[in-house]
Amino acid sequence: MPALATPQDRFRGCLLGFAIGDALGFALRGLPPNALRRAACLADDFLPRPRGRFEKGQFSDDTQLLLATAEAVLSQGRMDGKAAITQYSWLWRDGIILFPPLNLTNSIHAFLSGMPWMSGGADLGVFEPSCLSRGAIIGLWEERAPGVVAHRATMLTVPTHKEPMCAAACAAFARAIQLCLGEEPQTPQAFCQALAYTAAACSGQLADELCFLPRALAWESERALSLLRTVLVPSKQCQEEPGIPEHVAPVLLIALFAIMRSPGDLRKAFNMVLRLGGAVDVSAGMVGALFGARLGVGGFSPRLRKNICYGEHILCAADRLFQSHQQNASALALSESSCSHNQQQRPPRR
């Protein structure tokens, strides 16, 4: 995808894009995949009054947690797991989070009862994907060092998900955001290798699957998507959950496959994901964030930009995050320059 936007507009496009994809998918949760495959244009506009009682353009808890993570970073000027779970707890306690996952509720209960922030997350073997949206904030905010990205992903996922694969998927999504922010074009192989290298610090299994992902581009899309929805997912869960299972691996892999299959066509990439059913809100949100990080707000149709709920609030959060990021980067550069100057002025040892 060609880079057409300013850095600040890409911050805006990333957050707005996640919300748009999430809202498109939120309206479809619970619908049978067979019915969705016959739909002509799921990505053109939000369904009216999705889920039966929300206004048009309403997004799910995934965007709410994304924005809460941004607020946690803004409040501290850095990534902080305790600040993040504190923000989630405020929203949860006020009844703002829509359909909070059980593991999020349990983690918040544990935190509010006095358990350390890093100890109350869901146990190993829980792969629920609500942690993935936090990767967008890591990708926008953090430096592009794989080890740093993996560490920050662990820090932000462990309050609710102790499973290392959740941190690995979050880290891979964050690295994908960073690559989309960059100016250099990426081949699918180089793109996935960079993601795998970042994820490997947390999960070798997911890193291997990311390395293999470009091979799926040689297959027909329907066959590839059918196989990707089963990757690392127990067979029983695949049978019980039609469409994209509630598991970080297929949610991540399907989103990445969609943008690599249709790198210049957002509408086609959205439709590819939305027609699968299941956990389409998270996966479509990731598609939107990746396109937005590359193309900015202008990459989305005026209709989607106009009809997304709380669009101005999302853009304001993106602007604040960008300004804080710039100030942080300037302060870091000044500190490094000062250290270098002091070393040059220091007299040599005898």
Image (cartoon, grey):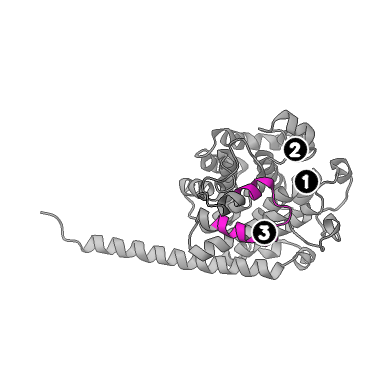
Residue 321 image-quadrant placement = bottom right
Verify CB contact (< 8 Å) between mark 1 and mark 2: yes
Residue 54, visible in the rendered structure? yes
Q: Which amino acid does label 1 sit on?
A: Met
Circle 3 packing at 10 Å, graded few (<14), some (14-19), many (20+), is some
According to the image, label 3 marks what residue?
Answer: 64
Residue 169 image-quadrant placement = top right
Determine whether, in the image, residue 16 is placed left or right of residue 176: right
Is 282 magenta? The answer is no
Residue drawn at (52%, 53%) of the image: 81
Please say if 274 is above or below 342: above
Spot occupied by residue 109 in the image (x, y as percentages of width and height): 61, 51
Is residue 63 or residue 208 the one in the foreground?
63
Image: magenta residue range: 84-107
Question: Which numbered circle lies on residue 225?
Answer: 2
Q: Which of marks 3 and 1 is in front?
A: 3
